[in-house]
Image (spheres, rainbow, N blue to C red):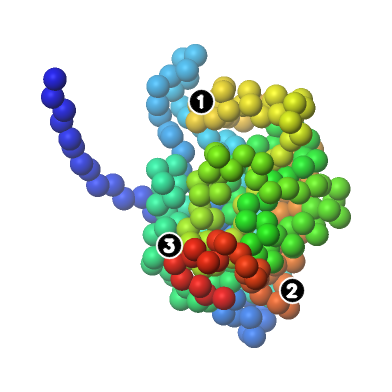
Amino acid sequence: MGFALRTAQFSSPNVVGLLPGTDPALADQAIVLGAHLDGYGFGQAVDGDPIYNGTLDNAAYVALIVHLMEMRASEGYARPVIVALWTGEEKGVHGSEWFVEHPTIPLKQIAANINLDQLRPIFPLELMTVHARTDTTLGADATAIATARGIRVQDDPEPERNLLRRSDHWSFLQAGIPAINFVFGYEPGSRSEEIYRQWYRTGYHRPQDDVAQLMDWQAAADFNGFFYALVDRVANQSEAPAWQAGSKLRQSAGNDNN
């Protein structure tokens, strides 16, 4: 038995836009709002359906960022906001890595990344996992907003799944830029955990991740409101996001910009 090895090269663009800031003094502190636009497209059919729609992974959160920019286009924020819709995330966060290596503005002028991925609004949003929660001031910002909205926060309860490193915020953390990402949390043994586990068996990277799937629309609205408030706070407050003293992620970052 023999093996044949083939290589191929593909190109796929990121989509990047800029909403200029309103405060010239904060012009060198851009906030990147990111979500990945790639999915699995056509694949092996499941129940006769070969289209891997990627509604929650991650089209819904691309749409959320676009919608926020449409709402704030005329008013803006104090800091510049870079909208970054990444390609190549499913194949290894290639789009965000490329951006960090070839930024559209000097990397030192990027103050933070707020990433939207791994979000599943399929049960009530009562508990939220916040990646890198204690590593940067973004964690404190997110905690304050979530608490005010009746949402408890936690660190990753399943670090063995390596979710911290499996989406585009990781590219920024590795470059020394504060970044944050979120996952809907659940209590062990709860109905929410049952729904979450079932989705990963029947919806994750499958055609069933489409607009017809069962969703908790109130949970989706609760997260959207949280996200709007977080962006407003981070993009407008006087102090730029920063690393917390003693962060192990900061110590391992390849380039500290703060």
Residue type at tag 1: Pro
Relative to 257, does residue 167 appear above or below in the rendering? above
The reply to whether residue 245 is visible in this rendering is yes
Give residue 135's quadrant in the image: bottom right
Q: For the residues carrying marks 1 and 2, which lies nearer the camera in this image?
A: 2
Relative to 219, does residue 75 appear above or below in the rendering? below
Measured as percent of width and height from the top left, residue 158 is found at: 62, 39
Q: Residue at x 66, y 68 (%)?
A: 244
Residue 99 numbered mark, or none: 3
- Asked whether 17 or 145 is in front, the reply is 145
Residue type at tag 2: Gln
Residue type at tag 3: Phe
Measured as percent of width and height from the top left, residue 79 is found at: 64, 74
Say whether disc 2 or disc 3 marks the residue closer to the N-terminus.
3
Decide if residue 8 is on the left or right side of residue 66.
left
Callout 2: 10 Å neighbours few (<14), some, many (20+)?
few
- Asked whether 136 or 86 is in front, the reply is 136
- Asked whether 130 or 216 is in front, the reply is 130
Considering the numbered disc 2 on the image, is that residue within a helix, a strand or a loop?
loop
Q: Gap in Å between the C-alphas at discs 1 and 2? A: 41 Å
Say whether disc 1 or disc 2 marks the residue closer to the N-terminus.
1
Residue at the disc numbered 2: 237
Residue at the disc numbered 1: 207
Callout 1: 10 Å neighbours few (<14), some, many (20+)?
many
Measured as percent of width and height from the top left, residue 31 is found at: 60, 67
The reply to whether residue 215 is visible in this rendering is no
